[in-house]
Amino acid sequence: MTQNVALDLGWAPSACTLPTAEQPLRVAEFDALFADAVQTVVRLAPTRLRLELVFGPEHAARAAELAARENGCCSFFTFTLTIADGGLALEVTVPAEHVEVLDALAERAGAAAPA
């Protein structure tokens, strides 16, 4: 897999406690979720992103598990998984000082979403 170094550096800020060797694996896990499940990417605010996912229990479980692990090493993230009216969405919020991390996440998710 070819990775964009600039995005990867924005993805893992100094506040991240995930061991450096594990960071590319986590990025790959997010990339796989984005490729398999993201339908649309909506930037609701500079610090808030909404990912509309393909509805299904497997995508909900995968997004929840990945969000929980990511929050364990980058506690500045707030993830909200919403399952309602036959839809599935993952909202990601960060404090203003980590907007560049959300920018990188939005760009990666957008690149994987259908045109």
Image (cartoon, rainbow, N blue to C red):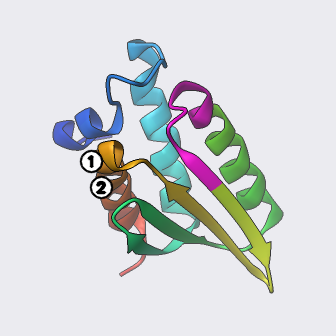
User: Which residue lies most toward the front here?
Assistant: 96
Q: Looking at the image, which residue is at 50% across and 55% down?
A: 93
Q: What stretch is highlighted in magenta?
A: 70-79
Nearer to me, 94 or 5: 94
Say above or below: 68 vs 58. above
Q: Is mark 2 on a helix, strand or loop?
A: helix
Q: Is residue 112 left or right of residue 93?
A: left
Percent position of residue 33, x then y: 55, 53
Quarter of the image that includes the C terminus = bottom left
Q: Looking at the image, which residue is at 51% across and 69% down?
A: 50
Nearer to me, 101 or 66: 101
Which residue position holds label 1? Answer: 100
Which residue position holds label 2? Answer: 103
Q: Is mark 1 on a helix, strand or loop?
A: helix
Percent position of residue 90, x then y: 61, 63
User: For residue 21, which quarter of the picture?
Assistant: top left
Quarter of the image that includes the N terminus = top left
Percent position of residue 35, x then y: 48, 60
Percent position of residue 69, x then y: 64, 32
Q: In this view, does 4 lie to the left or right of 46?
A: left
C-alpha span from label 2 to label 1: 5 Å
Nearer to me, 61 or 44: 44
Say above or below: 3 vs 106. above
Using a 10 Å C-alpha cutoff, classify the residue at mark 1 as few (fewer than 14 neighbours), some (14 to 19) or many (20 or more).
Answer: some
Name the kind of residue labelled 2 in the image.
Asp
Residue 75 shown in magenta? yes
User: For residue 20, which quarter of the picture?
Assistant: top left
Q: Looking at the image, which residue is at 50% across and 38% down?
A: 76
The disc at residue 44 is none
Nearer to me, 14 or 29: 14
Q: Do the residues labelled 2 and 1 touch (CB within 8 Å)?
A: yes
